[in-house]
Image (cartoon, rainbow, N blue to C red):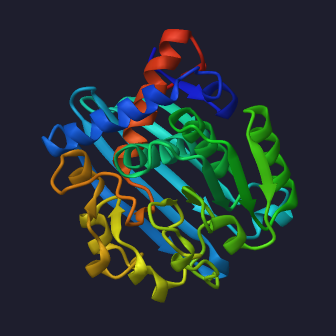
Amino acid sequence: MPYYISLPEDALARLELSSQQIVDAIEEAIRAERKGEISTAPKSAIFASGGRYMMTTLSSADEPPITVVKSVMVSPNNPSRGLNAIEGAIILHDSDTGQLLAVMGSKWITAVRTAGLSAVVAKRLANPKCKTIAFIGCGVQARSHLEIFSKMFPLRQVRVYGRGQANMEQLCALAETKGLTAIKCQTPREAIENADLVVSSVTLSFELTPFVDARWLKLGAFAAITDAATPWMGETLAELHTVVIDDLAQEQVSEKKMLDPGLITGDLKGLVGADFAAGFDPHKTSTFIFRGIAIGDFAVAGLAYHQAKLMGLGEKVSWN
């Protein structure tokens, strides 16, 4: 009898995947996409009333023979309902037969794939001796980035700025468990100025009034801007130097552009494929501005599915 594997968030969190495995899987998938071995579609999005934002990603390959679909929704009113601001799910099909293989939670995979994408860029552009990291936004994405960046760089100090006191406390506590000094900042400028690394992960909202100035970044700093730059003052982005985005083709067809196309150095595929010169430059800022791409979801969801089968995790559900 056909069946699929149900992998809720608690099962995914037990997969014991290392940061290096995540980064390697993403880079391998990017290279495979460049060679035409994985097909992806630009992220689709619907903007609804009340600041709601629905998005999907789609990717498929013959080897491994899987098709990955992710559907996620941002609902600003959810926290007042006792729900997460972002909800969604990921489904895997056999790309040959169409058979349903797995249904997964989207939160853990989105968190680690986003941090993994940032890591792919940071290891090529950031100062390998980074000691100070600043967070604008202190939720799930901030914690996942702290996990991966603390393994990549000799960090000593963490500065946090966010709107939620509980999230700030949780991020500081996580930093302290890693032997890092954690500082709660009163303003975003206090957090960003003189930081080696900056992570911006404010919950995506195109109705947000920008409050972050790109001119606060010091020369040599690297910023991972995971929120499509919505909290950043658009007129200050022209001060940035090296600017990498996730996907040039996706950005071209997106209804809401992240920044002026003339400011973009290249995209993730070009960076990994060495299509343009890249490396740490102490005299320039470098940034990765992105909204998320299908290849990241494909890489991590496929890795998670394979690992779950090896570990015997997840519930088998009959599928007629």
| Furthest-front residue in this view | 283
In the drawing, does residue 190 fall left or right of residue 296?
A: right
Question: Residue 27, image x and y in percent?
Answer: 31, 37
Residue 144 position (above or below residue 72): above
Residue 106 makes an appearance in the image: no
Viewer-side residue, 273 vs 86: 273
Q: Is residue 83 above or below residue 172?
A: below
Task: Determine the residue positioned at 71% across, 60% down.
Answer: 85
Q: Position of residue 239 (x, y in %)?
A: 41, 80
Residue 172 in the image: x percent, y percent? 80, 47
For image coordinates 47% across by 39% down, the residue present is 91
Is residue 148 placed above or below 237 in the rendered structure?
Answer: above
Residue at (29% x, 73% y) in the render: 253
The quarter of the picture where residue 60 lies is: top left
* Any part of residue 41 in sight: yes
Left or right of residue 315, residue 67 in this image: left
**Depth check: 106 or 267 in front?**
267
